């Protein structure tokens, strides 16, 4: 089998029992499958939930805490327990693992994004298995990501993974909620995530986890747009991940027929914070979206926000955001230059160079 780079996401419900404690049988099953995948020659990255679920009992909570301070305290206790279990278990298979804690800003800030990519590249080059989780003890927004679903998709994009495997307690995607409707039919294969499917998904069936099927669909949509193939489903046994990789998994496979691998630069542009807006005319939008050209001042007619050179801005055509890019002008400079032809300008003509642009909407 061809060597692949694979991100495996294990949610809380797939790792713990109904009491919120680490389920030894489930845990060992995952370890055996991950080890077999790694020893088969594949590069493996693990995104593991379970820190809050593993820690809240140690703090004396009878069930998963609902307050932010309770979740963060439970994560602080549980994360060390979880990583210790993983490290010891993987060493039994002669696999070295490493803990990587990430937050939203690691994907939205350019330098941190580049550093994260460099770290993962070095770990994988040295045959280390990264174990990734959100930095729940200090981060607020990350606890609402959906049980690490979106984090796993972001990691898959960051490392240009061939495959994202999201293990859950439901065997794939259905036409309607199978918990409520016995007539629900499973999708064995999808080429994209339609909006209609998002409407029929509901919350998690687990009392331990935080992510429902909707968060998995949103994560899958991002991953396939970044160039990864996705599997959402369940499995058991040491061969389960190899079976999934071979196309014999108990779940839904999602792979775009048209998506190409999105560069790290363009992924960062999609995730970065926006400092302002630029409004362009018909000729400029055609140059950007159809002709693959850069944005020039002549096509700009209005500005919003306060941005400086190097900031990321959204680009609008007829009140619709068509994309975003790294701007080469400050707002004040662009106000003086917009509408002018290149021959009238003293500085480099591009407002946004085509290499620093990502399209978000078909025009």
Image: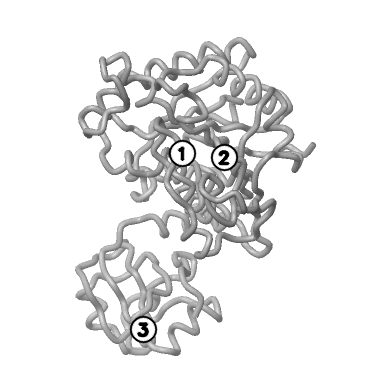
| Left or right for 107, reference 193 | left
Mark identifier at residue 170: 2
Residue 15, position in %: x, y? 50, 25
Question: Number of labelled discs?
Answer: 3
Neighbourhood count class around disc 2 (C-alpha, 10 Å): few under 14, some 14–19, many 20 upward:
some
Residue 167, image x and y in percent?
57, 36
Report the side of 257 relative to 351 (left or right). Answer: right
User: Residue at 46% of width from left, 66% of height from top?
Assistant: 358
Q: Position of residue 260 (x, y in %)?
A: 62, 60
What residue is rendered at 55% in x and 64% in y?
194
Q: Which residue is mark 1?
A: 205
Its colouring scheme is one colour
Q: Residues within 10 Å of mark 3 (few under 14, many from 20)?
A: many
Residue, disc 3: 280
Q: Nearer the viewer, mark 3 or mark 2?
A: 2
* Cα separation between marks 1 and 2: 9 Å
SS of the residue at dot 1?
A: loop
Picture residue at 51% right of the left edge, 15% below the top: 87
Work out whether 327 lies above or below 281: above
As drawn, 348 above or below 224: below
**Nearer mark to the viewer, of 3 and 1:** 1
Q: Secondary structure at mark 2?
A: loop
Question: In the picture shown, does residue 315 fall above or below 179?
Answer: below
Question: Would you say the residues marked 1 and 2 are in contact, meaning their CB atoms lie under 8 Å apart?
Answer: yes
Badge 1 density bin: few <14, some 14–19, many ≥20, Cα 10 Å:
some
Left or right of 324 in this view: 335: left
Q: Earlier in the sequence, mark 3 or mark 2?
A: 2
Which of 182 and 280 lies nearest the eye of the viewer? 182
């Amino acid at each position: 089998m061809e060597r692949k780079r694979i991100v495996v996401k294990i949610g809380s419900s797939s790792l713990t029992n109904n009491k919120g404690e680490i389920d030894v049988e489930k845990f060992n099953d995952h370890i055996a499958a991950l080890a077999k995948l790694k020893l088969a020659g594949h590069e493996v990255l693990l995104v593991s939930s379970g820190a809050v679920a593993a820690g809240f009992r140690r703090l004396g909570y009878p069930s998963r805490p609902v307050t932010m301070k309770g979740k963060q305290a439970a994560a602080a206790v549980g994360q060390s327990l979880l990583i210790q279990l993983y490290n010891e278990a993987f060493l039994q298979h002669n696999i070295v693992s490493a803990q990587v804690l990430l937050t939203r800003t690691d994907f939205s800030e350019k330098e941190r994004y580049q550093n994260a990519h460099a770290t993962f590249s070095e770990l994988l080059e040295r045959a280390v298995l990264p174990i990734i989780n959100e930095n729940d003890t200090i981060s607020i927004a990350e606890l609402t990501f959906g049980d690490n679903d979106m984090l796993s998709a972001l990691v898959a994009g960051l490392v240009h993974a061939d495959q994202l495997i999201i293990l859950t307690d439901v065997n794939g995607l259905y036409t309607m909620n199978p918990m409520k409707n016995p007539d629900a039919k499973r999708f064995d294969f999808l080429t994209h995530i339609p909006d209609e499917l998002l409407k029929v998904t509901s919350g998690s069936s687990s009392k331990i986890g935080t992510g429902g099927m909707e968060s998995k669909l949103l994560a899958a949509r991002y991953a396939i747009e970044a160039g990864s193939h996705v599997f959402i489903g369940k499995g058991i046994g040491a061969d389960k991940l190899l079976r999934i990789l071979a196309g014999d998994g108990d779940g839904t496979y999602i792979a775009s027929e048209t998506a190409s691998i999105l560069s790290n630069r363009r992924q960062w542009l999609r995730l970065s914070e926006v400092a302002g807006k630029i409004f362009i005319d018909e000729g400029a939008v055609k140059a950007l979206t159809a002709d693959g050209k850069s944005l020039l001042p002549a096509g700009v007619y209005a500005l919003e926000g306060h941005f400086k050179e190097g900031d990321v801005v959204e680009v609008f055509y007829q009140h619709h955001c068509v994309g975003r890019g790294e701007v080469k002008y400050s707002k004040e400079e662009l106000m003086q230059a917009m509408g002018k032809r290149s021959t009238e300008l003293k500085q480099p003509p591009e407002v946004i160079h085509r290499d620093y642009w990502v399209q978000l909407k078909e025009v």
